[in-house]
Image (cartoon, helix red, strand yellow):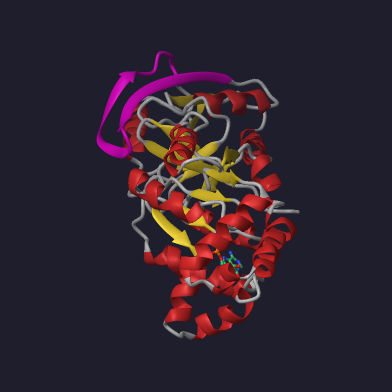
């Protein structure tokens, strides 16, 4: 089974960040910048000036790649406060050497508003340098408000807050070898409640959704609601459900997407009865990705087949569900689970997101077992 990997988020202080630019991509871009600069500088010995703190990684990696003699120095300005680019820049450490007649190349990690550049140009105004050039790894064209020429640009990025590779969020994140982008939507907790028919997913979801303020989506319930209201979707689903077979993937996926969209402000979801196939698991990943989110855990209620049959037959006496009334249909539903659904356990296990919970016992005991897993996530 080849399913797309889930995005790994990181948390710095109160905010979540998602992977944006890999260490490999950065390395390639740095190599290109070095090549462009060495071509222009030729045999002169340039002075590279890093702007602390953010540029320390850029400068370090840059000069390690620089194939000819060069000098390196730093100046320190303070410009960032949290995620807002501050207008007010202070000079904390200025130039300490005479740069008269030298070719100076500023190495920046990022240029956004360009405020730092104003200060840099002010610093160099009175130095009689031969030339002053600006190189930056990242550049946010949408944010740039100045006219200073940028001589060497690594990667143009959208106007979103990033961390890593020297860039920080309130002090954290500078050490990351790759770059992360701030996650727009708030953090969600998304659970897949898993297990064969009759395992108690619906019962437990009712408790968990209250306790964790999550939206519960049971694909079975949505289908039954549509059948009751005689919608086109209901009519289509009914023919499969009556036999205990799965409704076709595309129909189910479209419906699930629509249900999630209806709850755009949710803290997260409990998916119950979904995903049931590889295609559905893949679709769920894509949906979570599109929300800058992920499935945190698949929690499975484990119950023996014979207990399931017994439970479903007894539920059938009051539920009015046609698929609970007939033992052979029940067994077919359980078989569908083992044939098509149980393999999803491997997919989530491989990401250390599978948690099996004993589904036999009192309802309260099982809720406690599930909560113990969720609280540890
Ligand atoms: P449930 O209420 O989860 O036991 O589901 C009842 C029936 O609805 C199943 O036997 C299927 O026919 C249909 N169904 C529910 N969820 C799905 C799904 N994710 N994919 C396909 N069919 C589903």
Q: Position of residue 259 (x, y in %)?
A: 44, 67
Residue in the image at 51% along x and 52% along y: 200
The N terminus - image quarter: bottom right
Q: Position of residue 183 (x, y in %)?
A: 43, 46
Q: Determine if residue 131 is in view.
A: no
Q: Is residue 85 magenta?
A: yes
Residue in the image at 61% along x and 76% along y: 242
Residue 160 higher or lower than 245, as above or below: above
Q: Position of residue 17 (x, y in %)?
A: 46, 40
Q: Which segment is the magenta one?
A: 71-99
Q: Quadrant of ligand 1?
A: bottom right
The one nearer the camera, 345 or 331, is 331
The answer to whether 351 appears left or right of 73 in the picture is right
Residue 178 falls in which quadrant of the image? top right
Q: Position of residue 269 (x, y in %)?
A: 44, 53
Which residue appears farthest toward the left when viewing the image? 88
């Amino acid at each position: 089974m080849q399913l797309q990997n889930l995005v790994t988020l990181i948390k710095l202080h109160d905010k979540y960040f998602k992977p944006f630019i890999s260490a490999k991509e950065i390395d390639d871009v740095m190599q290109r910048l070095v090549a462009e600069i060495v071509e222009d500088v030729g045999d002169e010995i340039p002075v590279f000036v890093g702007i602390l703190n953010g540029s320390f990684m850029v400068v370090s990696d840059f000069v390690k790649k620089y194939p000819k003699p060069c000098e390196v120095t730093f100046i320190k300005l303070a410009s960032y406060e949290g995620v807002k680019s501050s207008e007010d820049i202070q000079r904390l450490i200025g130039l300490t050497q005479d740069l008269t007649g030298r070719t100076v190349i500023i190495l920046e990690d990022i240029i956004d508003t360009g405020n730092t550049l104003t200060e840099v140009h002010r610093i160099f105004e009175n130095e009689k340098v031969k030339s002053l050039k600006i190189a930056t790894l990242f550049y946010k064209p949408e944010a740039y408000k100045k006219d200073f020429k940028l001589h060497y640009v690594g990667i143009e990025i959208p106007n979103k807050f990033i961390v890593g590779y020297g860039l920080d969020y309130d002090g954290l994140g500078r050490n990351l070898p790759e770059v992360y982008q701030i996650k727009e939507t708030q953090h969600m907790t998304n659970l897949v409640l898993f297990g064969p028919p009759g395992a108690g997913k619906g019962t437990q979801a009712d408790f968990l959704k209250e306790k964790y303020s999550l939206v519960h989506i049971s694909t079975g319930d949505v289908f039954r609601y549509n059948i009751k209201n005689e919608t086109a979707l209901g009519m289509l689903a009914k023919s499969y459900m009556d036999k205990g077979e799965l409704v076709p993937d595309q129909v189910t996926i479209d419906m699930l997407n629509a249900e999630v969209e209806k709850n755009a402000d949710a803290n997260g979801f409990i998916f119950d009865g979904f995903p049931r196939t590889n295609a559905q698991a893949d679709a769920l990943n894509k949906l979570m990705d599109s929300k800058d989110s992920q499935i945190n855990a698949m929690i499975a209620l484990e119950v023996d087949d014979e207990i399931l049959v017994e439970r479903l037959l007894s539920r059938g006496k009051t539920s009015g569900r046609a698929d609970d009334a007939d033992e052979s249909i029940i067994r077919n539903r359980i078989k569908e689970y083992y044939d098509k659904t149980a393999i999803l356990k491997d997919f989530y296990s491989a990401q250390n997101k599978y948690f099996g919970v004993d589904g036999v016992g009192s309802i309260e005991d099982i809720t406690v077992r599930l909560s113990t897993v969720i609280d540890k996530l």
